[in-house]
Image (spheres, rainbow, N blue to C red):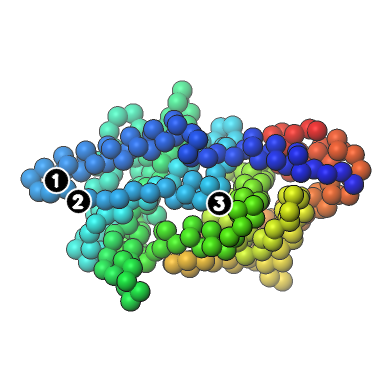
Amino acid sequence: MVNLQTQFKKFHNTIKVDFDDNQPLRDKRNLIIDNLKDGLEKQFFRNKAPTFNSFNQGSYGLATGVEPLPKEDYDIDVGIIFNLSKNLYQPVEVKKWVYTALNTGARTVEIKKPCVRVQYHLNNEKSFHVDLAIYSLGKKDDGGNKTTHIAKGLIKSPEDEKIWELSEPYKLKELLESEFADSLDREQFRRIIRYLKRWKDYNFCSTGTERPTGIAITACCYEVFTPEKDNDLRSLLNVVSGIIGMFSGNNQISVKLPVQPYNDLFKKMTNIQMTSMKTKLINLQNTLTAASQEPYTFNACASLRKVFGSDFPGL
């Protein structure tokens, strides 16, 4: 049987996005942070502007980012933690501060339920967007740590959906790093996540709720990943088989975020979409199995390109 580790490593190097290595994305992120500070100063010119700290979250915080497919854009997730009590301000009110501060120039700003999105365009095409998750920093909990709550809700949302929801934005990264103490295991874990992210981007429609989210893929990998030294194909096959095993008898899947607020990451998918996802996972499982048994590298790579796209190397 052929050894495809070299091909998988090449594939990974082609699709990976590391925020620390991407100066243009870092510059845009930093520009938005600076604009937010300046915009808040203007809004609160008669009073002291609220202060905040920022941090990378999502795929850039976890080092699991992937290059977007053609016609799709970069997705940058940034956490904004305001130094204020959630008891003093309504969540959507704080989102409006951010919206007003950033709604300048050619970019498009939109208040979404979980965040404030800043969208950039290039030649009338979406080039990248920054999702700003807005948090409040509260009092210390019983463990001596300050609690954080994320602002949820739209301007037109019912009042009971405009909430400050308990959240642990830093803990997920800490959890993943502590789970895989060995650096080589952690690197393979991140590669497996990136392979599956490219698979889901390539095989699912980008609009609506058909495509599983990146955080849902990450949580699934967290549940079933086992390291396989120098064999990404075997590790990936084990993970895919493990995810298939998470589906119930009626082809439904429910996986919770492993930190607060412990929400179901597949909640928005319909029963039909979940069944479709399982079918595509089984196809991926069969393709990986066949590739692992294929005696010729060219044939193995050709079959893998059908599920991962042309960025998977031919040889």
Q: Is residue 83 above or below residue 76?
A: below
The image quarter in which residue 11 lies: top right
Q: Residue at x 62, y 65 (%)?
A: 223
| Identity of the residue furthest to the front in this view | 182
Q: Amino acid at mark 1?
A: Phe
Q: Residue at x 67, y 55 (%)?
A: 277
Q: Is residue 127 above or below residue 261?
A: above
Q: Amino acid at mark 3?
A: Gly
Dot 2: element: loop
Within 10 Å of disc 2 (Cα), the crowding (few <14, some 14-19, many 20+) is some
The image's mark for residue 44 is 1
Q: Amino acid at mark 2?
A: Pro
Q: Residue at x 43, y 39 (%)?
A: 129
Of tags 3 and 2, the one toward the viewer is: 2
Q: Is the residue under label 2 in contact with that under label 1 (CB below 8 Å)?
A: yes
Tell me if I can see residue 51 in this picture.
yes
Which residue in the protein does label 3 denote? 214
